Amino acid sequence: MPSGEGLRSQTEMSERQRRRGLNEAVFREVNERIRDINERFELEPQSLDLVCECDDTSCTDRISMSAADYEQVRADSRQFAIVPGHSDSTVEVVVAREKGYDLVRKQSEAAAIAEETDPRSP
């Protein structure tokens, strides 16, 4: 049976993962608004200038991708686009390395949070 200290450590880790997942959801929401503005004003840029969707709230790095590539990222609620090197192997796996960004897919509890917070989910 786990000790009280072990349970506390698991709870702290779970809470930290939850906060990280929520941070990423906020960045995803910002990028959704950027896409919406481009559509609303019928802007058709060569690429969208987006924010890194990593879990670091102090990250201000930018990524660029075509609107079509962005739609492919958003096709899976568990996927996020981040600056190369910003991945966190405790909650995600890099599934593709693209020009200027990595595509990561959330795992376990982080995946559930990503799905629950997806603005495109019904």
Image (tube, rainbow, N blue to C red):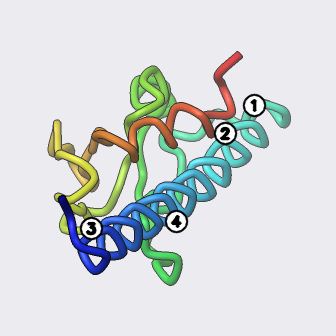
Q: Are marks 1 and 2 in contact (CB under 8 Å)?
A: yes
Label 3 or label 4, whichever comes before in sequence order: 4
Q: Residues within 10 Å of mark 3 (few under 14, many from 20)?
A: some
Q: Quadrant of residue 95?
A: top left
Q: Residue 1: where, in percent of width, then height?
A: 18, 59
Q: Residue furthest front?
A: 1
Q: Secondary structure at mark 3?
A: loop
- Mark 2, residue position: 35
C-alpha separation, residue under disc 2 versus residue under disc 4: 25 Å
The Cα–Cα distance between marks 3 and 1, rounded to whole angstroms, is: 29 Å
Residue at the spot x=41%, y=31% of the render?
73
Q: Are marks 3 and 1 in contact (CB under 8 Å)?
A: no
Asked if the residue at tag 1 contacts the one at tag 4, i.e. Cβ–Cβ closer than 8 Å, the answer is no
Identify the image quadrant of the C terminus: top right
Which amino acid, by three-letter code, is at mark 4?
Answer: Arg
Circle 3 or circle 1, nearest the eye: 3
Q: Nearer the viewer, residue 3 or 56?
A: 3
Which residue is painted at 20% across and 64% down in the image? 2
Q: Is residue 41 above or below residue 3?
A: above
In the rendered image of this protein, does residue 60 appear above or below residue 87? below
Q: Write down the residue under mark 1.
A: 39
Q: Earlier in the sequence, mark 2 or mark 3?
A: 2
Task: Give SS at disc 4.
Answer: helix
Q: Amino acid at mark 2?
A: Arg
**Mark-to-mark CA distance, 4 and 1:** 30 Å
**In front: mark 4 or mark 1?**
4
Q: How many marks?
A: 4
Q: Amino acid at mark 1?
A: Glu
| Residue 102 in picture, x, y percent from top left | 24, 50
Type of amino acid at the residue the image marks with label 3: His
